[in-house]
Amino acid sequence: MASSAIYHARSISLPSRPHPVAEQLDEQLSRLRSSQSTSTSSSSVSNALNGLKDLYSSVDEFLQLPLNQQNLSQTQSTTLVDHVLDGSLRLLDICSASRDALQLSRERLQDVQSALRRRCSGELSITSEAIEYLNARRSVKKAMKKCLKNLKLANEIKDEANVSVTLLKDVQAVTADTFQSLVSYISGSRKSGWSVVAKLITKNNNKEVATSSEFEAVDATLNSFICQKKSGITSSQIENLRSQMLKLETEIQDVDEALECLFRNLIKTRATLLNIFSY
C-alpha cells in the first residue's frame, strides 16, 4: 500500500523507514483483501472474522503511537471526524445485530430439535416449531437487509490526505467487505454485490435441495416438511434434518465466538478514537 511509506519513525542517524506497526497493518490488509471471496461457508466467514480480530489488534497498537494520535487529533475537518466515528459505530451495530440474529436462529433451531426428540416419544408433529423457526428466519433476513444498507454508509469515508485517516478508511472498507459475507451467510443466501440474492432451488421431495449454506439447507428442508405434512415424512428425511441442524448449530457457535472476540476489538478501537478526537 502506498500510504505505508508515509508512516515514519524518525532517527537522527538512520534513514526514515516505515514503522513496524504500519508495515504489519499493510500486510494484514493485503492478506485479508486477497483472501476475500464470494464464499458464504461458515469456515470462510469464521476465518475472515478471526483475521479482522488480528487486524484490529494491530490498529489499536497503531493508534497508541503518539505521532499517530497527534496526527488524528489535529484533523481540521469536522466532517471527516464524523465519518470516521460514524463508520466505527455502524460496524459495531452490524456486529451486534449479527450476533442477535445468530442467537435468535439458534434458539428457534433448538426448539425444532426438541420437537424432533418428542416426536421419537410419540408426538408426531413438528409443524408449529418449524413455522416458528421460519418466522424467526424471516425476521433475521429483514435485519440483515438493513445491515447491508448500513454497510454502504460505513464504507463512505472519502479519500483524504491525512494518512492515518486513510488507513482507518482502508480498515473499515475491509471490515465492510467481510461483514457483507457474514450477512449473506446468516441470511442463507449467495453473496451478490451489495444485495442478498436468495435462490432456493427446491426440487422434488425425494431429490436433493441445492443450497449455498447450512442456513439455507435447514430453511429449505423445513419448508419442504411443512408442505409434506399431509403426505407424511420419512425416517430418512428426519435423520437428514437432524444432521443438517446439528451441523448448523456447530457453525453458529463457531461464527458467534469469532464475532464476540471481534466485537470487543471494535469497542476498544472506537473508545480509543473517541479519546483521540476529544483532545
Image (tube, rainbow, N blue to C red):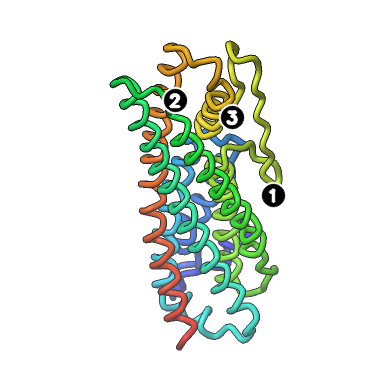
Viewer-side label of 1, 2: 2
SS at mark 2 in the image: helix
Q: Earlier in the sequence, mark 2 or mark 3?
A: 3
What residue type is disc 3 on? Ser
How far apart are labels 2 and 3 at the CA level?
13 Å
Where residue 58 sits: x, y (%)?
A: 42, 59
Residue 34 picture quarter: top right
Q: Residues within 10 Å of mark 1 (few under 14, many from 20)?
A: some
Residue drawn at 59 percent across, 78 percent down: 82
Residue 56 picture quarter: bottom left
Where residue 225 sits: x, y (%)?
A: 53, 24
61 to the left or right of 223: left
SS at mark 3 in the image: loop
Q: Residues within 10 Å of mark 2 (few under 14, many from 20)?
A: some
Where residue 196 sits: x, y (%)?
A: 66, 44
Q: Looking at the image, do the residues carrying marks 2 and 3 touch, with CB atoms under 8 Å apart?
A: no
Q: Between 45 and 269, which is closer to the camera in this rendering?
A: 45
Q: Between 110 and 260, which is closer to the camera in this rendering?
A: 110
How far apart are labels 1 and 2 at the CA level?
28 Å
Residue 244 is tagged as: 2
Q: Which residue is mark 1?
A: 194
- Quarter of the picture containing the C terminus is bottom left
What residue type is disc 2 on? Gln
129 to the left or right of 29: left
Residue drawn at 58 percent across, 51 percent down: 144
Q: Which residue is mark 3?
A: 212
